[in-house]
Image (cartoon, grey):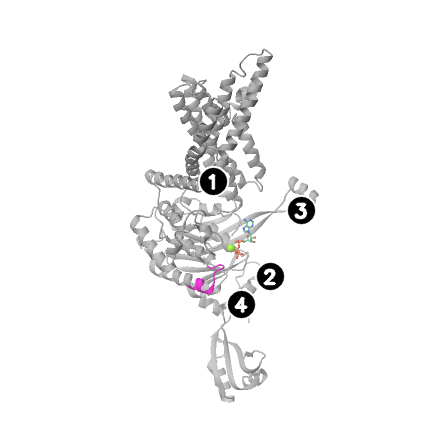
């Protein structure tokens, strides 16, 4: 027994080093990636459904802009031309295909079925594990979803090019931050399962609500001003609206920096909030079954 | 010696909501839920020394799993204290769980979709097991639990017994100081049970690991544990050595007698008249006498019988542990309904 078992009745203090943490959570990223790859057949249809969403919006906005032009109402809606609008929609959905995941649903299931106990007896933090898995999943989504969808959607619907090389780069950075914000928000929603008997309704509301509030379903610029300024105080615009506006070149210079900083702030803030909620919940919660 | 596991006045209340019936009841439940607290663990105290293997037993719903969940840091107690090796499980969860191994017979701690070996590799990283230790442990665990052939399969495809062996191996991979086993032999066949008991005995002897084990199979206890703690309705009703448990209930022994010629039990009762010996009501060749060792010497009973009639064979056995424990449960239940805090000393017969 290397730990000197019977000699002492004390357990040695222990802490995972940053390097070891990187190794461990990196391993979780890899495993999640491989897991999704193994189930890839289930996801092939995703490319089709994303394309259909974009197609729907495409024809809708074409008709809308054509109607306005016929009435002589000007060529922009909410500051966007028809070309920009279609680009907005396409990039929003392409981005969503990357950052989307089911953390809230998975966490809620683990809590209600008591599987959470099996994570609490291991020396890791489930929040970090789930974030790592989300990164692994995003890697899978990038190759199996995002890139194929781009290859279909961009030429078919004449999606506009990014506003420049820098804009493209910042869009990628920005969507990466979206992944963190989306995941942590989703983790927080999942934590509600600790307090609620039945969380299915909340999960459904989240599915629709997120897409609405992020501006994926209806572009933010369509909302009334009061709504836009209210939403400004919430993290949702940082998930989709900010990166898409960077792509379109509507956020440059200081506005771009502000956007990225705002995203970083939300990412950090939500991660801390989720950690606190988790701590509170696991300390007062009862675990089902067994 | 300083105890490794220290438990004082540990309590856990579950908050229950009683549902009313019907639509009206459902609406009322929404407005004013009927809540009450259920005390699942009630002022439990014990100390466990390093290297002990302790059986923690009790009827269904007695509070065994709840206690284990508090000791492993899954649940926070309502009150009372627990320290294991100086750590408070639910406060120092990350560093504490590094040192313990846990098996819940009812569910697996392995990753459902991963091949068993992938789960082990992940555990190696999680517990920071170095390569040499990992290889040695894997080899040892394969020798003892015969898991080599299972390594390539996903956990969801394993049978219960196979899964349990893998779970045990997983709990021991990082050579924990303390092992918590909640029904590790549940649902296993006789041979599998026997193997797992042998394995646990070996691990305990070799590694000096401290073990708390819950079970409904008293064979586990008899073969593995010198010390047992019996709880009922959340309270400790017995804490001591197995032999002490037998003594407390009354050391009943069971003498079976095979006669040459058939007889009625009344005939035999007549032979031992004057001694507090009970003969089971039987006729024929095989007869069974029960008596308390403290009151009657077995030698006296045997001499009386043998002198009286021709005897083919004799067999003297202690009361099976099941009966002893049943007796304790019965006393515990009686105490719970009567009055509060007695721990059931009177070994009434
Ligand atoms: N999550 C929970 N919520 C409410 N009550 C619970 C919960 N878990 C257990 N209980 C109650 O607490 C009591 C003790 O349960 P526990 O699971 O600790 O018993 P046990 O001794 O492990 O029983 P078994 O032998 O059946 O596994 C029971 O009355 C049970 O109904
Ligand atoms: Mg139990």
Determine if marks 2 and 1 fall on one subunit: no
Which numbered mark, 4 or 1, is in the foreground of this view? 1
**Badge 4 or badge 3: first in the primary sequence:** 3
Q: Is residue B7 left or right of residue B326?
A: left
Which numbered mark, 2 or 1, is in the foreground of this view? 1
Determine if marks 4 and 2 fall on one subunit: yes
Residue B251 picture location, percent across and down: 49, 72
The chain containing the residue under callout 3 comes to: B
For the residues labelled 2 and 1, the Cα–Cα distance comes to: 64 Å
The circle on residue B346 is 4
Determine if marks 3 and 1 fall on one subunit: no
Determine if marks 3 and 2 fall on one subunit: yes
Q: Residue furthest front?
A: A156
The circle on residue B338 is 2
Is there CB contact under 8 Å for labels 4 and 3?
no
User: Is A41 inside the magenta-drawn segment?
Assistant: no
The chain containing the residue under callout 1 comes to: A
Span colored in magenta: B185-194
The chain containing the residue under callout 4 comes to: B
Q: Nearer the viewer, residue B151 or A183?
A: B151
Residue B181 picture location, percent across and down: 44, 56
Whether residue B295 is visible here, answered yes or no, is: no
Q: Is residue B168 left or right of residue A193?
A: left
The circle on residue A41 is 1
Determine if marks 4 and 1 fall on one subunit: no
Residue B99 picture location, percent across and down: 37, 50
Element at label 1: helix
Looking at the rendered image, the quarter that the N terminus of chain B falls into is: bottom left
Q: Is residue B127 left or right of residue B336?
A: left
Looking at the rendered image, the quarter that the C terminus of chain B falls into is: bottom right
Element at label 3: loop
Give the residue at mark 3: B20
């Amino acid at each position: 027994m290397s730990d000197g078992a019977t000699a002492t009745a004390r357990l040695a203090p222990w802490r995972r080093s940053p390097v070891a943490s990187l190794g461990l959570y990196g391993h979780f990223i890899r495993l999640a990636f491989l897991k999704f790859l193994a189930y890839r057949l289930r996801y092939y249809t995703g490319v089709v459904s994303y394309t259909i969403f974009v197609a729907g919006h495409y024809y809708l906005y074409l008709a809308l802009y054509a109607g306005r032009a016929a009435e002589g109402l000007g060529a922009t809606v909410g500051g966007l031309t028809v070309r920009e609008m279609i680009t907005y929609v396409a990039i929003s959905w392409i981005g969503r295909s990357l950052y989307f995941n089911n953390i809230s649903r998975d966490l809620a299931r683990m809590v209600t079925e008591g599987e959470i106990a099996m994570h609490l007896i291991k020396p890791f933090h489930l929040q970090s594990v789930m974030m790592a898995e989300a990164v692994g999943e995003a890697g899978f989504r990038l190759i199996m979803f995002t890139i194929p969808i781009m290859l279909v959607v961009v030429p078919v619907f004449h999606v506009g090019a990014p506003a420049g090389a820098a804009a493209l780069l910042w869009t990628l950075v920005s969507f990466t931050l979206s992944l963190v914000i989306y995941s942590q928000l989703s983790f927080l929603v999942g934590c509600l399962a600790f307090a609620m008997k039945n969380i299915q309704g909340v999960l459904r509301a989240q599915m629709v609500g997120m897409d609405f509030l992020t501006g994926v379903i209806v572009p933010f610029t369509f909302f009334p001003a009061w709504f836009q300024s209210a939403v400004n105080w919430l993290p949702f615009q940082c998930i989709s609206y900010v990166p898409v506006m960077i792509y379109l070149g509507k956020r440059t210079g200081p506005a771009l920096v502000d956007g990225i900083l705002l995203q970083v702030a939300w990412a950090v803030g939500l991660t801390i909030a989720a950690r606190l909620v988790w701590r509170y919940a696991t300390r007062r919660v009862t675990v089902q079954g067994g | 010696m300083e105890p490794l596991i220290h438990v004082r006045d540990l309590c856990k209340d579950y908050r229950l909501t009683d549902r009313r019936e019907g639509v009206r009841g459902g609406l009322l439940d929404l407005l004013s839920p009927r809540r009450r607290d259920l005390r699942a663990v009630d002022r439990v105290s014990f100390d466990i020394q390093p290297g002990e293997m302790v059986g923690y037993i009790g009827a269904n719903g007695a509070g065994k799993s709840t206690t284990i969940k508090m000791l492993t840091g899954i649940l926070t107690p309502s009150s009372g204290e627990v320290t294991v090796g100086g750590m408070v499980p639910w406060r120092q969860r990350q560093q504490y769980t590094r040192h313990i191994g846990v098996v819940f017979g009812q569910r697996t701690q392995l990753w459902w979709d991963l091949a068993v070996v992938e789960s082990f590799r992940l555990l190696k990283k999680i517990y920071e097991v170095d390569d040499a230790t990992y290889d040695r442990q894997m080899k040892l665990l394969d020798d003892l639990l015969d898991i080599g052939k299972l390594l390539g399969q996903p956990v969801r495809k394993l049978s219960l017994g196979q899964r349990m062996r893998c779970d045990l191996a997983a709990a021991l991979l990082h050579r924990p100081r303390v092992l918590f086993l909640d029904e590790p032999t549940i649902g296993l066949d006789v041979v599998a049970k026997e193997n797992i008991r042998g394995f646990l005995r070996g691990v305990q002897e070799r590694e000096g690991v401290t073990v708390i084990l819950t079970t409904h199979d008293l064979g586990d206890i008899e073969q593995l544990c010198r010390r047992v703690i019996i709880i009922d309705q959340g309270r400790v009703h017995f804490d001591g050595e197995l032999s002490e448990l037998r003594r407390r209930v009354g050391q009943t022994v069971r003498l079976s007698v095979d006669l040459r010629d058939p007889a009625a039990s009344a005939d035999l009762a007549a032979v031992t008249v004057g001694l507090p010996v009970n003969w089971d009501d039987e006729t024929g060749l095989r007869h069974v006498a029960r008596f308390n060792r403290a009151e009657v010497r077995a030698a006296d009973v045997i001499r009386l019988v043998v002198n009286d009639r021709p005897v083919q064979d004799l067999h003297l056995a202690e009361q099976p542990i099941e009966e002893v424990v049943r007796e304790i449960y019965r006393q515990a239940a009686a105490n719970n309904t009567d009055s509060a805090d007695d721990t059931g000393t009177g070994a009434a017969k």
